[in-house]
Image (cartoon, grey):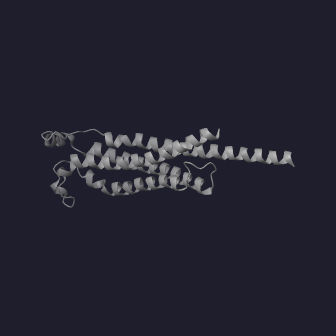
Amino acid sequence: MYKKQMKLQRIACFLAIAAGALVFLYVLGMMTDLYDMLYTMVPMPDDPSSVKVAGAMIYYDMQGFNRTFLRVAIGLLLAACLLFVTNTHSRRKYYIGNYAAIAIDAVANVAAALWAHGQIAAFKDQYLTTVDFEQLERRLSRAGTFTDSTFWFDAHLGVFAFALIAAALLVVCAVWKAQLMKNERKLIEAGKAVSA
């Protein structure tokens, strides 16, 4: 049983790192796509009258969120690295530090998913209701960069589903490890009682 649990805990820790990296890449990709499509339509953020396409100001509206989201993604990567600093991926017996690292990573993933989902859903709604896609298509179709896709707004569901699965797997590993350690202590105590 220990070998299976050890293998699963190693997989869970590497999935946690992958989840943090995926969130980081998602943050970069989402704003890059909006930049390609909307930045030239809003040349000056302090002069709303210079907007070439109605609703294109969403690019600037999202900047504060994006900066915070980037910090959150870096935090998720650091939380996942904490699993390796505490040797959670390879330790046969967990200590307080291992349980703390798992709790920090799992809570960070859940909190980030809930926070980001609410923010991204609101920005998606703003994007769909305020951007004049006909005007945008006329301006961008010549360059071949036009798209009215909401892929980057919708992709967060898959990204955070992966992060939540990784967090859940870490918790399952911690519970399984605690149960195995408890059973091992019982066997040791029973062995001592028989030999005494």
Q: Residue at coordinates 41% horizontally, 42% vertically from top-left?
A: 159
Q: Quadrant location of the N terminus?
A: top right
Residue 83: % across, % down: 52, 52
Residue 57: % across, % down: 24, 52
**Extreme front residue here?**
195
The quarter of the picture where residue 175 lies is top right
Residue 22: % across, % down: 39, 46
**Extreme bottom residue here?**
46
Foreground pick, 2 / 36 = 2
For the question of whether residue 100 can be seen, the reply is yes
Q: Residue at coordinates 35% horizontally, 49% vertically from top-left?
A: 27
Q: Residue at coordinates 53% horizontally, 44% vertically from top-left?
A: 10
Foreground pick, 65 / 133 = 65
**Extreme right residue here?**
196
Question: Seen in the image, is 132 located left or right of residue 142?
Answer: right
Residue 177: % across, % down: 63, 45
Foreground pick, 106 / 99 = 99
For the question of whether residue 55 can be seen, the reply is no
Q: Number of callouts in the render?
A: 0
Q: Residue at coordinates 33% horizontally, 44% vertically from top-left?
A: 125
